[in-house]
Amino acid sequence: MRELCEMGKTFLIVEHRLDIVLEYVDKVYVMASGRIIAEGKGKEVIERPEVVEVYLGA
């Protein structure tokens, strides 16, 4: 996948386990109830209060 990315290919990955994909992605979109609630760089997005609340129930 990394080699293809270096060749200019783009991927859409749908995954609920962010620990698996964060090292491979440039940008993350977080959806809840059919709408995007956050987007941006991986670690920044997963630390946003609205994302934590939706996915961890905090």
Image (cartoon, rainbow, N blue to C red):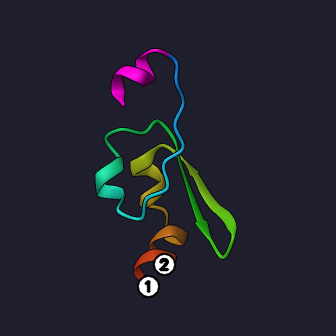
- In this rendering, the answer to whether 39 lies above or below 16 is above
Residue 55: horizontal and vertical position, in percent? 45, 75
Mark 1 is on which residue type? Gly
The residues colored magenta run 1-7
Furthest residue in direction right, as rendered: 35
Dot 1 alpha-carbon crowd within 10 angstroms: few under 14, some 14 to 19, many 20 or more: few
* 31 sits left or right of 41 in the view: right
Image quadrant for the N terminus?
top left
Dot 2 alpha-carbon crowd within 10 angstroms: few under 14, some 14 to 19, many 20 or more: few
Furthest residue in direction top, as rendered: 7
Residue shown at 36% from the left, 58% from the top:
18
Residue 11: horizontal and vertical position, in percent? 52, 37
Q: Mark 2 and 1 residues: CB-CB less than 8 Å, in contact?
A: yes
Would you name the residue on which mark 1 appears?
57
Residue shown at 44% from the left, 85% from the top:
57
Q: Which mark is residue 53?
A: 2
* 22 sits left or right of 53 in the view: left
Mark 2 is on which residue type? Glu
Residue 52 is drawn in which quadrant?
bottom left
Residue shown at 31% from the left, 41% from the top:
23
In terms of depth relative to the viewer, which is nearer, 15 or 39? 15
How far apart are the alpha carbons under marks 2 and 1? 5 Å
Residue shown at 43% from the left, 47% from the top:
42
